[in-house]
Structure formats: structure tokens, C-alpha cells
Image (cartoon, helix red, strand yellow):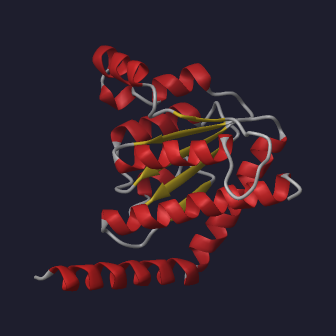
Amino acid sequence: MNISKIITNSLNESLKVNKDSVIDDNFFQQLEIASSLLIETFKNNGKVLLAGNGGSAADCQHIAAEFIGRLNFDREPLPAIALTANTSNLTCIANDYGYEKIFSRQIKALAKSNDTLIVYSTSGKSKNIINALVEARPLVKSIISLTGAYTNDLIKYSDAVLSVNTAKTTRIQEIHAIAGHIMCECVEETLFDN
């Protein structure tokens, strides 16, 4: 296959998944719920904890930076911690307790009752993410899960599940990035006078 065809196919596929998400009433409703949960978290002096693996770990750091820094305009910082960013914590916990506990152990140490946990799992099956949800459920105010089409293991622990109806990781991650920006934008526009 030539490069032009690969680019065209990828762009068309991305546009289709984007369009499908826009017209998916459940996705829209869950995005609205997730945004409202975040607004309430910050209004009540809570913080956001974020967890994910691989590219989703980068999404965690990206969205934490949007909350702490800014998205569309200058404003006060909002507390957010990407549990993916502290390599000493990650390697210590992985070495001493196992990789499946890298997030749950941090949640046990950091989570408070007015916090929100955001997890990213394109498969919806990552053991360390499931463990994070189990640990967080009795500790935090709300849990938001961003995932692909498989939601069975996430839905019972989550207050909002943003599920992208495709099995292709790249397309799922693209929608997760858009959803992260939209949630941040809802928070900014609601909590701060621009």
C-alpha cells in the first residue's frame, strides 16, 4: 500500500469514529456527566487523579497539565495528579508489589473523599486499572473511565464511562484526547469568568 492511501484511509477512519462518537447519545450523555463530576470535584476543593498505560499514560499527563496550566485562557490552577508521572513511585511499587498495583497503591496514599479518579484503558481490561478502580471506589467521590468498546470490567466501578465503539487503539486514543479537552473546557468555562 502506498503512503497516500495509508494517509487517506487513516484520516477517513478517524473522521468516521469522530462522527460516530458525536452522534452517539450515550457517549454525549456520559461526557456531560463526566464534565459535571469534574466541576463538582473542583468546586468542593477536590483533586483529580489520573491513571493509564502506554499512550494512555501520556493522556493522563496531558490532561493533568491542562487542569494545572490552562486550556483556553489564563485562570487559577486546578489540582490534578497523573499517577503515571513519578518514575520512582512506579518502579518502586512495580518492583516491591507487582505492576498490577502501580496505581492502586498510589490511590491508597493520595485519594480523598472529595476527589475524582479518571482512568484510561483502551482495552477496558488492564489489571492495574481494574485494581485502581477497586481501591478508589470507597475512597473517592467519583470515577470516570475512558475506554474502547469493552466496558464490562469498568462499568460497575464508574460513575461515567466514555466508551468509543471501535477496537482500534489509535482511534480510541484520538477520541479520548478530544474528550479530555472537552471536559477541561467545560470545567474552565463553568468555574472561571473568561
- Would you say residue 148 is visible in this rendering? no
Residue 162 place in picture, x, y as percent: 54, 62
For the residue pair 188 and 119, the one nearer the viewer reads as 188
Which quarter of the image is occupied by the C terminus?
bottom right
Which quarter of the image is occupied by the N terminus?
bottom left
The furthest residue to the left: 1
Give left or right: position of 132 versus 124.
right
Up the image or down, 55 lies above or below 9; here it is above
Q: Quadrant of residue 169?
A: bottom left
Q: Residue at x 33, y 64 (%)?
A: 170
User: How many numbered discs?
Assistant: 0
Q: Quadrant of residue 47?
A: top right
Up the image or down, 91 lies above or below 149; here it is above
Residue 152 place in picture, x, y as percent: 43, 57
Q: Residue at x 77, y 49 (%)?
A: 74
Residue 116 place in picture, x, y as percent: 65, 41
Residue 154 place in picture, x, y as percent: 47, 51
For the residue pair 167 and 71, the one nearer the viewer reads as 71
For the residue pair 39 and 9, the one nearer the viewer reads as 9
Give left or right: position of 80 versus 36.
left
Q: Residue at x 49, y 61 (%)?
A: 176
Give left or right: position of 160 versus 46.
left
Q: Residue at x 55, y 46 (%)?
A: 157
- Would you say residue 160 is visible in this rendering? yes
Q: Quadrant of residue 69?
A: top right
